Image (cartoon, coloured by chain):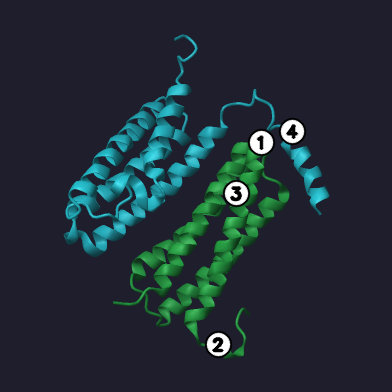
Amino acid sequence: MFVAGPLVGDDRRVIPVLGYAILAAGLVLALWTGIQAARRRPTSEAQMIGAIVVEVALLVQVVIALVQLFGGHDVAEPVTFVAYSIGVLLALPLGFYLAREERTRWGSVCLCFTAVVVAVMMLRLLQLWQAPVG
Amino acid sequence: MAESRAVNEDRDGRAADADDAPPTGPRRLLIALYLVFAVAATARGVVQIATKFDEAPLAYALSLFSGLVYIAAAVGLITDRRWSRPLAWAAVGTEMAGVLIVGLLSILDSTAFPHDTVWSRFGAGYGYVPIILPVLGLMWLWQTRPNAARD
């Protein structure tokens, strides 16, 4: 659904495009919740929905990546790649849960931190995906 | 759209601007930090030991050890039992010592301590959070100690 005709089968481009979009979304969510924390406010409903949207995008991205990985795409460190793929899905649910429990600015800080974690892990995943196999 | 969001925030935000809120907030942030590092360090240690243990056995064993220390600290922070605070003190104290010792050794002896464990170079690979985290943890434990009012 993300690729037009000419890109089908080119597994080096599908993941980076979606990956960078998720990376950017993670940073936006971090900035947004960070400002919320600076204003001494708990997360807003829109931010919680934002976290869910990013998480769903992550899930789609991880499924595509793992399907391609087991379908023959070579990465330099497959074990690390799979571990990061699973790990990156855990961060936002943690932040979401804490932001729901903690209806103060600290809940916003928690979601902000886990959004940063997503962005960093996404960057690492992109590096691992594109690193030369050797 | 910005207007309607601001209204929501005002309704939700009322609890936040009071200074007499219970001191659960910082603790929850510490829990988030420690859980993330527990997963990151443990997974990294397991992968290193499984794939390249022979390259630097001591460092990679310590990598896994650091993960277990983070898990212990997270358990100590999350639970509210009689052993919770002693466990948190022990784990965060071990973490403080570990990041200082491994950080120093990774600079002095980069063969035995390569730069790819959580505590190497004082946690530079993780934005120096590994050396800030135990400081925050110790500060929180000190400030929330049960007999603080009597001292």
Looking at the image, which residue is at 60% across and 26% down? B22
Q: Residue furthest front?
A: B108
Whether labels 4 and 1 belong to a single chain: the reply is no
Query: How far is the residue under mark 3 from the one under mark 2?
Result: 35 Å
Which is nearer the N-term, disc 3 or disc 2?
2
Residue bearing mark 2: A8
The hue used for chain B is: cyan
Disc 1/disc 3 C-alpha distance (Å): 17 Å
Dot 3 corresponds to which residue?
Answer: A96
Q: Which residue is mark 4?
A: B14
Element marked by disc 4: loop
Residue at 60 percent across and 64 percent down: it is A56
> Are the residues flagged by discs 2 and 1 in contact, CB closer than 8 Å?
no
Q: Nearer the viewer, mark 1 or mark 3?
A: 1
- Going by the image, does A7 lie left or right of B8? left
- Count neighbours of disc 2 (C-alpha within 10 A) and say few if under 14, some if 14 to 19, many if 20 or more: few
| Nearer-N-terminus badge (1/3) | 1
Please, which chain is the residue tagged with disc 1 on? A
Nearest the eye: B120 or B141: B120
